[in-house]
Amino acid sequence: MQKVVTFGEIMLRLSTEHHLRFSQANSFMANYGGGEFNVAVSLSNYGVPTEFVTRLPYNDIGQSALMEIRKQNVSSENIVYGGERLGIYFLETGAGTRGSKVVYDRNHSAISNIEVGMIDWKKVFQDTSVFHWSGITPAISQNAADVCLEAVKVAKGMGVLITTDLNYRSKLWQYGKAPKDIMPELLNYSHVILGDLDTAFMMTGKDKLNLDYKNTDSLPQYYNLFFEQYPDLKYMATTMRYSISASHQQIGGVFYNRAKVYTAAVSEVTPVVDRVGSGDAFMGGLIYGLLKTPFDPQYTINFAVAACCLKHTISGDFNLATLEEVEAMVKGNASGLVSR
């Protein structure tokens, strides 16, 4: 199986322990994560060769992030170095009726000042099946958006399948551009898009739809509007997430291939250990299903939902569930019994 390349920012994550509020915390748990890196880790755990491309500062924190990348069996061959600092985000983990909070501290991070030409994308995409990017990267800065556009252009020219998670983060679009100014051009190159249709329409400058995803018969007409706008698009997927509380989630999914809507049954996830990165786990599962031979749309959406559910039970940014664990859940084994 040829490799999957992801591009984005890896950050230092500082989270409160035991569901404490920021104001109560005297210490923070430190680990690393970031949407696109999280996807690479998921796929690596499933036995797929992966590579993460980013820009790291040449200091001890940057080196620690590099060690984490290598620890997760993700290639770092084409990472570039420079810039002032690694981005940081602070996480206050919610519980029950109190939601989680994120505070970003990533201004002037190494990747925000990346420049076109710094990465040899033709070298990166040799022997590559899939290139994955998300809406987080072009939200960081104009520079990051420009390099993302540079990457998808080269990937398309080399026949690489391009996948995108829309990943709208309202707190990030702060450099004078809105998603509708940047995302439409980037999405022209995408073959697979993950995101709910309301977000997709908002990020491309259209009116919000307020759809009912339980009424699957109505979905094709709205998905098709997106397919008409982006001729290279092959598949769209949506995570169906119903938040009962911070500790109780219901997770399902929809997959559309221009002809038929495939749905995965909604699963109950309670108690939630860590919700951060669950969408990335879904994306990793989606890509794994796309790479599997023969390709089965129903298996793909079932696998993505199972991976997403399992991530809710794992602390940290990335999904450490194994292929065997995800496939067991796809087959209906969600008992949580001790494996002896």
Image: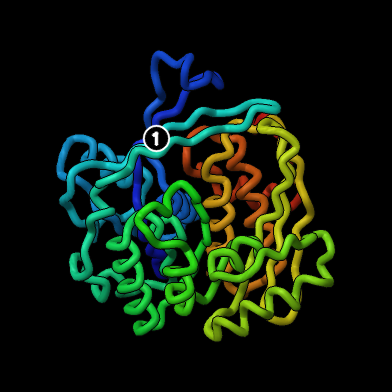
> How is the structure coloured here?
rainbow
Task: Name the kind of residue labelled 1 in the image.
Answer: Arg
Instruction: Decide if residue 44 is in sight here.
Output: no
Q: Residues within 10 Å of mark 1 (few under 14, many from 20)?
A: many
Left or right of 197, for residue 13? left
Look at mark 1 in the image and give the residue it sits on: 13
**Residue 29, horizontal then vertical, whole percent:** 41, 25
Determine whether the residue tagged by mark 1 lies in a helix, strand or loop.
Answer: strand
Residue positioned 40% across, 22% down in the render: 28
The residue at 75%/37% (across/down) is 244
Q: How many marks?
A: 1
Q: Residue at x 40, y 57 (%)?
A: 139
- Specify the quadrant that holds the N terminus: bottom left
Of residues 180 and 231, the one drawn nearer to the viewer in this rendering: 180
Which quadrant holds residue 274? Answer: top right
User: Residue at the location (59% across, 79% down)?
Assistant: 234
The x, y position of residue 310, in whole percent, is: 62, 42
Position of 128 relative to 246 (above/below):
below
